[in-house]
Image (cartoon, rainbow, N blue to C red):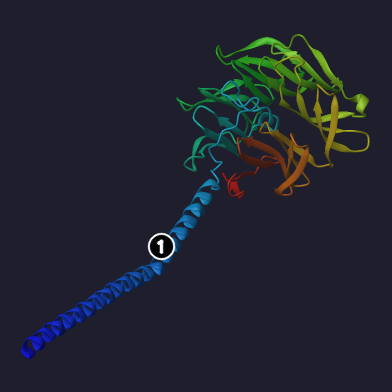
Amino acid sequence: MKKSIIFLMGVILVFLLVGCDKKTTTLLSNSTTAATTLTSSSIVTSTLPLTTISQTTTATLTTTTESTTTQESTTITSLKTVELSYLSSSSYYGNTNGNASNHGLVAYDKTNKLHYYAVGPHVYSYDPATNESSILFSLSDGGNVRNLCLTETDIYFVSTHDLYMKKYNIEAETITSINEAETYYLSRYNNYIYVNYTHNVYEVMGFGIYRHDNQAFLSNFSSGATLLNVSGTKLLYSTNNGPAIELMADTFMGKTTIKYLSGNSIVEINEMLLIKEGYSSPYPRTFGLIASTSSETALYLYTTDTDALITIATGNSLSGLNTDGVNLYFINGGELYRYIIETNTTEKMMNLLGDSKYLYVINHWIYFSNATFSTLHRINPDTHEIEQLSN
């Protein structure tokens, strides 16, 4: 009996020991799981700095991208080859009114995108796209070239040696004398070349018409006209009879007065430039005028639709009126100015040489010369640097 009781107590003890072992194993297992979870949490925590670095890198890249985009959007396109569309700047014209009125040392070949300019006895072509110049022709008679007037095949000009009107054929590379009379102005619209010269028979100065297509003068002649501006088949001009703006047809017929300026105390018009032309009724026109009263010389803006005469600047050395259709350029006391028509504001652009007198505009390029045409300079539209063009 005692042996049986001892045996039963031993079995119970064994069961108790086995149960304790299982609890210990479970606790160890839970402890292992907890350690694994902590390890995973530690890994996640260790990746936070990496995520932060990644975000910082992304932000840096974004900033760089935005900076690059901003830089690209503010990059200034070169103005050297940009063309402007304005009155008398087309292949139908031999030169712009502004360039022709400043004795035409510079002209634009719109077809071939070339600048032609005269320095002394030489005429050069300049390609703004390549920044290369080449000589076209030179005079051997001792004269200088002025009054450039282009067609598709020829360059008409005046030689200061005898003041004769001549032409240079671009393909044949030959020079031909056209009119052996003192010539002071050339301008063209289509086949009509307007020539200001001293008539051999009448012995007076006036305008004649030379036809480019049949190489002959018409019988039409208009004496007394000055300061000619060509606008298609219409001619704007002044006269020696008084300070007025006049209008006539391209054949010198149908003359009419647009504006008498004597009522504005003006006694003489020194320079006149047609800036804008109206093509529908009431056909408003805008002019730039350098004119004198009994007490001063001033630059004015005159508009026909409002009949307003606005004073822009005053000075005894005003000269060189020219335009790009948006701005009016002029010289005053050796300084280059720009009058912005839309905002009615004037700004000084730069100092020129003290003897600078004439301005020439080709799109965004500006050339200038002295009174004797012995020097010619060019202003780079991108850098505003002044380059002297030599013989």
Name the residue: 53% across, 50% down.
70
Does residue 170 appear left or right of residue 182 in this picture? Answer: left
Residue 150 x, y percent position in the rendering: 57, 25
Q: Nearer the viewer, residue 300 or 58?
A: 58
Answer yes or no: is residue 319 visible. yes
Q: Is residue 67 above or below residue 14?
A: above
Dot 1 falls on a residue whose secondary structure is helix
Quadrant location of the C terminus?
top right
Name the residue: 79% across, 40% down.
318
The residue labelled by disc 1 is 54
Quadrant location of the N terminus?
bottom left
Q: Amino acid at mark 1?
A: Ser
Residue 207 x, y percent position in the rendering: 72, 18
In the figure, residue 212 lies in which quadrant? top right
Q: Is residue 220 above or below residue 152?
A: above
Q: Is residue 388 above or below residue 188?
A: below
Q: Nearer the viewer, residue 137 or 66?
A: 66
Residue 256 x, y percent position in the rendering: 81, 13
